[in-house]
Amino acid sequence: MQILAPTATHFEPTAAGAVVVCGSHGGAYPGVLVSKAGIRAVILNDAGVGLDEAGIASLSLLDRYGVAAATASHMSCRIGDAHDMLARGVISHINMHAAQLGLLTGMGVNEAACLLETARPPSGIAPDMGESRHVEQLSKTRLLLVDSAALVDEGDDGAIVITGSHGGLVDGDPRKALRANAKLAAFNDAGIGIDKCGIARLPALDDRGVAAVTVSCFSARIGNARSTLETGCISATNSRAKLMGIREGDALAAVLANWGG
């Protein structure tokens, strides 16, 4: 059975034992969520691969637990959009278990998903990665670090939110850009990708009056908020962020070091 899922942060119970085409990036955090859901095989988005190949880190992780896994090129389909992945996605990377089933780079996601139907059940479950939400204080403002934007809630209104998540819209829905009205939000640009989908949250948050930026996937490890904060170099800003004096090329750490809000 094949299932389409816009994000790894929410799998329906029917995903257990299924082949899943998932819009999430192929980093370690989604890999753990895939494993815990009991998914038999998965295709994720390579998110530009990026620093330390963080965008495909799930492939080796899932290999260890017997899960056939592959990524689709961020230049072939929109991150966060499983339907688009299935329609025009092209496989960019595969793990050992996927290779044994006949998957090849350059293959269409649709064909690859059919081949994954013969995958065996997982041989184990990946352990938790530890706490993925941290709260700190920056001047008079709460600083929230979350490896996934799914860990943000309405109680985080007014905070600076630093995420490890991609800057694309989940399912293309502007309402899912961020659950809180943050003072500033930062995401990974996932290589920006086709249709500039990796920065699509920025205009959506502009419409809500939220300043937002992305950092280059080559400057910070996707899925890791601490990396976004410490080494992220800003690759795109929305209008609200520009009004705050934030510019492309700025180091996010330097922006926050000078924070006066």
Image: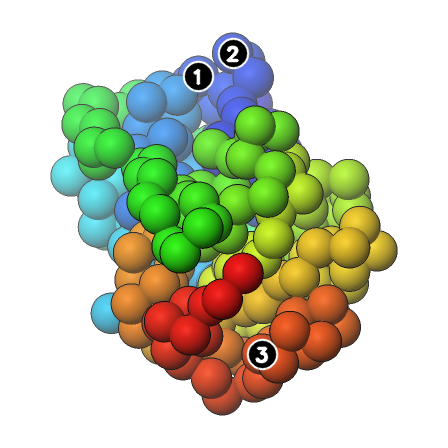
Q: Is residue 168 above or below residue 98?
A: below
Position of residue 140 relative to residue 248, above or below, is above
Image coordinates for residue 16, horizontal then vertical, percent: 44, 17
Identity, as a three-letter code, of the amino acid under mark 3? Ile
Out of 249 and 4, give the one closest to the viewer: 249
**Residue found at the far right of this picture:** 207
Q: Which picture quadrant has residue 40?
A: top left
Residue placed under numbered mark 2 in the picture: 13
Return the residue at label 1: 16
Q: Which callout, 1 or 2, points to the residue nearer the camera?
A: 2
- Give how far across and how far down residue 137 sits, in percent: 35, 47
- Camera-near label (3 vs 1) is 3
The Cα–Cα distance between marks 2 and 3, rounded to whole angstroms, is 42 Å
> Which residue is under mark 3?
246
Apparent side of residue 88 relative to residue 96 in the rendered image (left or right)? right
Residue 166 in the image: x percent, y percent? 52, 56
Q: Is residue 175 visible?
A: yes
Q: Return the mark for residue 54.
A: none
Whether the residues at callouts 1 and 2 have beta carbons within 8 Å, the answer is: yes
The C terminus sits in image quarter: bottom right
Residue under the image location 77 percent in, 40 percent down: 175
